[in-house]
Image (cartoon, grey):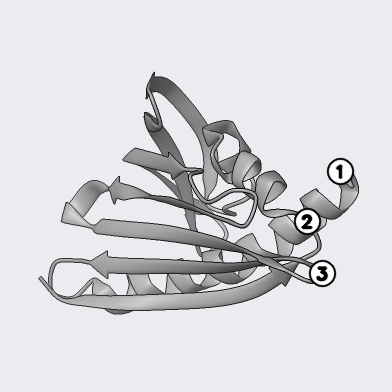
Amino acid sequence: MPSTELKHTFQIAASPEEVFAHLAEPSHYVGLSPLLVAVRDVRRNGGTVNYTGVERFRFLSVLRHDNIIDVTLVAVPDGLPHSAEISGEVRGSARVRMSYRFSIDRHAAGSVVTDTLHLRTPPGLLRFAASQAEAVQQARARILTARLARSA
C-alpha cells in the first residue's frame, strides 16, 4: 500500500507530565483532532487503551460522513519527568491505516512535542488522507497549546 510519514514539532509551555497526562486520555482527543467528534467503548489494559472513535468529514459544507475508527493508544511514562512517549495505531474504513507517535521532551520553556504520523492507504487515497492528517497535526498543536495554557 502507498505510504507517507508526516512529522510536526512544536514547543508548548507545559511540563512533559502535563502533556503526557492530556494525550494519554482518549476523551481529550475530542476536539483536539478537528475531525474527531466522539470516543466510545474505551477499554484499558495497563498502559494500553483501545477505543472506538468517530471522525466526521464534511464535503461541500452540506454532505457529512462519519468514519468509525478503531484506535490503540500506548502510553509510556518511563522517562518522566524528562520525557515520555505515546504511540498507537488507527484503523479506519477503506483500509486506511495510521500509526502515530508523540515524543514529549522537557525544554527550558516547558516541552517539545514531536507528532509523527505514518499513513498507509489503498492506491488513490494517499493524497487526500495525507492532506487531512497534516491539517489535523497543525490544528492539534494549536489546540493542545491553548488547552494546556488555560490549565496552567
Residue located 81% across and 57% down the image: 146
Could you tell me if the residues under marks 1 and 2 are in contact, i.e. CB atoms within 8 Å? yes
* Position in image of residue 11 (x %, y %): 71, 72
**Spatial separation of the CA atoms under disc 2 and disc 3:** 8 Å
**Spatial separation of the CA atoms under disc 1 and disc 3:** 16 Å
First in residue order: circle 1 vs circle 2:
2
* Secondary structure found at label 2: loop
Residue 14, numbered circle: 2
Name which residue type carries label 1.
Ser
* Secondary structure found at label 1: helix
Residue located 48% across and 47% down the image: 56
**Left or right: 136 as drawn, with respect to 3:** right
Residue at image mark 1: 151
**Left or right: 130 as drawn, with respect to 26:** left
Residue at image mark 3: 109
Q: Quadrant of the N terminus?
A: bottom left
**Spatial separation of the CA atoms under disc 1 and disc 2:** 9 Å
Label 3: few (<14), some (14–19) or many (≥20) C-alpha neighbours in 10 Å: few
First in residue order: circle 2 vs circle 3:
2
Residue located 40% across and 31% down the image: 47
